[in-house]
Image (cartoon, grey):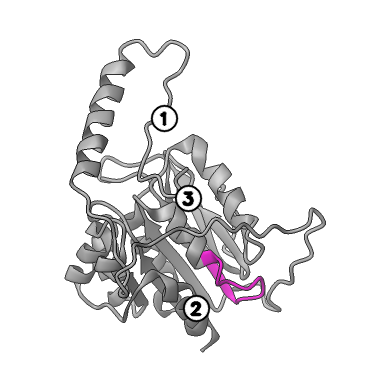
Amino acid sequence: ALELGALDFVAKPGAAPGEKLNVIREELIAKVEMVQRLRPAVSPDGARRTVSTVLRTVPKDDSRPLPLQDTPRKVVVIAASTGGPSALVDVFSSFRSDTPIAVLVVQHMPARFTRTFAERLDRLGGIRVSEAVDGHRLRAGRALVSPGGTCVDVVRVPDGFAVRVGEPRLSDRYVPSADRALTTAAEATKGRLIAVVLTGMGDDGAVGVKAVKAAGGTLVVQTPSDALIDGMPRNAMLAGGVDHELPLRFIGDRIVSLADR
């Protein structure tokens, strides 16, 4: 539903929701009020944006070629929230299976949905995608999706880079936290990092992009007027240091071109 244009959702309560109903009610009210305040994004030619429903699939005996080198030429961290699932499908559709990048996706999404979403991205047929597990290496030609309900750090290991998946800290305002992923990735990868901030409510990523620029990384931001929700890209731009501000349809190709340099 998110990929086809739904703005958000409220997870169904368990068999005995009890006192959680009050929390669910408040969450639902907040999200309905958010939708009321929105204006649909409009493309430069005046037409409202639509989401492609075309799904490429790969055979079960997956034989997609991988880059010659296991260590990525660039590490890409992509941050997104509301509107992110469909935007990520657009970006990932540009990736070749042998593109020499390792990707970490930080999409604000509950725990039980991130694995399914990773499988959805994997079926696009380009770069291979899975939900992140603690200790997973960041490998060229592969992408990891931050598990919902956790936060992911990027660390340097003897043969490259890996992720540490753990419980959120009190200081993590968003879960998963783009700020935390970007900050740790900047420290681990230095100038080999490409940070990408897509559509989303709030300002997650605005702190992290400062660390990215201080470490010599590259910052790509979706044009706020092109985003379904402009909060995250707008706040990333206010943080300064944007190298590439682009409409969504150009972002995937730009990441590939940056990795090929």
User: Where is mark 3, residue-wise?
Assistant: 3
Q: Nearer the viewer, mark 2 or mark 3?
A: 3
Q: Position of residue 238 (x, y in %)?
A: 17, 69
Q: How many residues crowd mark 2 within 10 Å: few (<14), some (14–19), many (20+)?
A: some
User: Where is mark 1, residue-wise?
Assistant: 11
| Count of labels in the image | 3
Name the disc covering residue 253, or none: 2
Task: Report if residue 154 is visible in the image.
Answer: no
Q: Mark 2 or mark 3, which has the lower sequence index?
A: 3
Q: How many residues crowd mark 1 within 10 Å: few (<14), some (14–19), many (20+)?
A: few
Dot 1 lies on which element?
A: loop
Q: Are marks 2 and 3 in contact (CB under 8 Å)?
A: no
| In this picture, residue 157 sits left or right of residue 153 | right
Residue located at (50% from left, 39% from top): 113
Question: 233 and 227: which one is in front?
Answer: 227
Q: Position of residue 236 (x, y in %)?
A: 24, 66
**Residue 96 lies in the magenta-colored region:** yes
Dot 3 lies on which element?
A: loop
